[in-house]
Image (cartoon, helix red, strand yellow):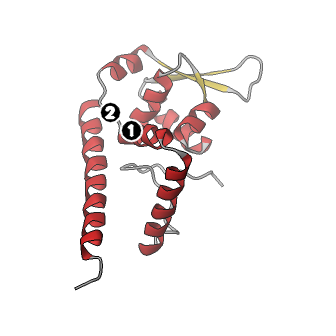
Amino acid sequence: MVKNSQQISEIIDSLRRVFQAVNEYSKKVKAQTGLTGPQLWTIKVVAEFSSIKVSDLARRMYLHPATVVGIIDRLEAKGLVSRVRSRNDRRVVWVSLTPQGEELISQAPEVAQGLLVAGLEALPSEEQRTIGEVLSQLVKILKAQEFPPKLMFSHEVNEPQK
């Protein structure tokens, strides 16, 4: 028998639960809104503010601005958000919800990414560091260092455009 088989079994079961939870949240989001998890998460973050700069939105979502711009492009095409350039600084773009986006958000389910970020932010920095180290080990075990960091259950990749 493998040493620490009970611990390994608990780790594997915990991972299964995490993947299952993210999958269930994603399916619910898609079924109820027609959006991907990252798209709904973006709308939820925008909804916290009357208007938010793209750079601040990216920071709040722990994503690269180029990734957020791609998500905003799709949300704008669906009529859920609008963008306005700052009059003072043309490089600054503000994002806000449209009435259609506000209506959608009022009935939207929870998003796994939002729950995960909120939960991690609430942890003490030492626990965040421990989780980061453990997840880095899992990435190495799975030989996944070269995989692009796709957003959960989405085609979006969180990396700067080259």
Coordinates of residue 123 in the picture (x, y in percent):
48, 43
Q: Residue at x 42, y 37 (%)?
A: 114
Label pair 2/1, CB-CB below 8 angstroms:
yes
Seen in the image, is 146 located left or right of residue 24?
right
Q: Nearer the viewer, residue 156 or 61?
A: 61
Coordinates of residue 70 in the picture (x, y in percent):
53, 40
Q: Earlier in the sequence, mark 2 or mark 1?
A: 2
Q: Residue at x 43, y 24 (%)?
A: 80
Q: Nearer the viewer, residue 129 or 146?
A: 129
Distance in Å between CA atoms under marks 2 and 1: 8 Å
Residue wearing tag 2: 110
Per the image, label 2 sits on a secondary structure element best described as loop
Mark 2: few/some/many CA within 10 Å (<14, 14-19, 20+): some
Seen in the image, is 155 located left or right of residue 96?
left
Coordinates of residue 88 in the picture (x, y in percent):
77, 18
Coordinates of residue 96 in the picture (x, y in percent):
53, 20
**Which residue is farthest right?**
88
Image quadrant occupied by the C terminus: bottom right
Q: Is residue 86 above or below residue 24?
A: above
Q: Amino acid at mark 2?
A: Glu
Residue wearing tag 1: 115
Q: Residue at x 74, y 16 (%)?
A: 87
Q: Amino acid at mark 1?
A: Leu
Can you tell which quarter of the image residue 90 is in? top right
Q: Is residue 70 above or below residue 159?
A: above
Q: Residue at x 51, y 62 (%)?
A: 133
